[in-house]
Amino acid sequence: MERDERVCLLCHRCGAELTPGEGNFYIVRILAVADPTPPAISEADLQTDISAEIDRILNQVQDMSEQELTEQIFRRLTIHLCTPCYRQWIENPAG
Ligand SMILES: [Zn+2]
C-alpha cells in the first residue's frame, strides 16, 4: 500500500501526523459514566409530593434532545495520541 493511500490521523494533543502501521501512536478509548448509585432517600423525601417532583423533572428534561440526555449519563470518546504525548498523558490522565 502506498503511503498516500493510508489514513492520516492527527495527535489529539499536539497535532502531529500519525500514520497507521508505523507504530507511532496510541488509541485511547474513554468511557465516562455518571455515578450509578441510587440516591439516598430520607423520611422527609417520602413525605413530599412525589408527583410534583416528577412534574419538575419532566419540565426540566422536556426541551432536551435524546443526545443531551444520553450525554448526561455517559460519554464515549476515542482519541489518538502520538507516542510522546501518550507517555505524558498516561502518567497523569486527570491532570
Ligand atoms: Zn502528540
Image (cartoon, rainbow, N blue to C red):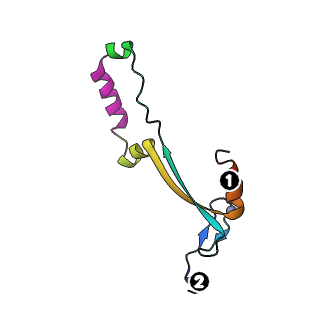
The residue labelled by disc 2 is: 4
Position of 79 with respect to 49 (left or right) is: right
Q: Residues within 10 Å of mark 1 (few under 14, many from 20)?
A: some
Q: Residues within 10 Å of mark 2 (few under 14, many from 20)?
A: few
Measured along the vertical axis of the image, is residue 85 above or below residue 75? below
Query: Which type of secondary structure does the marked residue at label 2 adopt?
Result: helix
Upstream in the sequence, badge 2 or badge 1? 2
Corner quadrant of residue 6: bottom right
Query: Which type of secondary structure does the marked residue at label 1 adopt?
Result: helix
Position of 28 with respect to 89 (left or right) is: left
Badge number at residue 8: none
Q: Quadrant of the C terminus?
A: top right
Which of the two residues, 82 or 61, is positioned nearer the viewer here? Answer: 82
- Identify residue type, mark 1: Trp
Residue 12 point in image, percent of width and height: 62, 60
Total tally of numbered discs in the picture: 2
Measured along the vertical axis of the image, is residue 63 above or below residue 51? below
Residue 43 colored in magenta in the image: no
Badge number at residue 89: 1
- Name the residue: 44% across, 41% down: 72
Corner quadrant of residue 44: top left
Residue 58 colored in magenta in the image: yes
Magenta highlight range: 48-62
Measured along the vertical axis of the image, is residue 58 above or below residue 88? above
Q: CA distance from mark 2 to mark 1?
A: 29 Å
- Name the residue: 37% across, 33% down: 60
Measured along the vertical axis of the image, is residue 50 above or below residue 73? above
Residue 74 point in image, percent of width and height: 45, 45
